[in-house]
Image: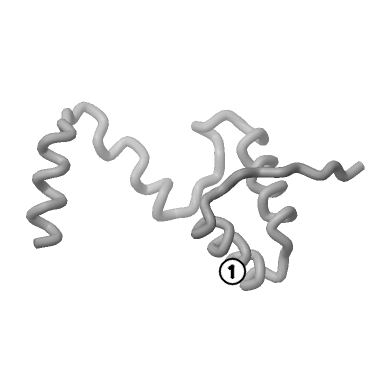
Amino acid sequence: MNTKLTLRIDDVLVQEAKTQAAQRGKSVSQMFGEFVAFLGKSKPNNRRLPPVTGSLLGVMKGHRVSEKNYKKHLREKHS
């Protein structure tokens, strides 16, 4: 059974969702349903992640990064 669901999402995200859905030949509803199903399939440690995302897991373990230092890094990077 399909049930209608209303979500309030920023206009930019709605447009991005529509673009991504069109590129995949799916509806936004299908993509959202697949995303929610993916979240519930397994425990986070066993979840299949995209290769780039998976490669980042644990890279900062044991490191402390303050918000102040991160903002400084961003200012230097983008100036």
What residue is shown at x 9% (from left), y 45% (from top)? 72
SS at badge 1:
helix
Instruction: Classify residue 10 as left or right of residue 76.
Output: right
Q: Nearer the viewer, residue 57 or 27?
A: 27
User: Going by the picture, which residue comes out furthest to the right?
Assistant: 1
Compared to 8, does 17 lie above or below? below
What residue is shown at x 50% (from left), y 32% (from top)? 45
Q: Quadrant of residue 39?
A: top right
According to the picture, the residue beneath numbered tag 1 turns out to be 19
User: How many numbered discs sit on the rendered protein?
Assistant: 1
Q: Nearer the viewer, residue 32 or 4?
A: 4
Q: Quadrant of residue 28?
A: bottom right
Q: Which colour scheme appears in the figure?
A: one colour
Compared to 49, does 78 lie above or below? below
* Rendered location of residue 53, percent (x, y): 41, 49
The crowding category of the residue bearing disc 1, from other C-alpha atoms within 10 Å (few below 14, some 14 to 19, many at least 20), is some
* Rendered location of residue 49, percent (x, y): 50, 47
* Rendered location of residue 46, percent (x, y): 54, 34
Pick the quarter of the image with the N terminus. Answer: top right
What residue is shown at x 73% (from left), y 53% (from top)? 29
Q: Quadrant of residue 25?
A: bottom right
Q: Amino acid at mark 1?
A: Thr
What residue is shown at x 11% (from left), y 38% (from top)? 69
Instruction: Classify residue 61 as left or right of residue 68.
Output: right
Pick the quarter of the image with the C terminus. Answer: bottom left
* Rendered location of residue 42, percent (x, y): 62, 32
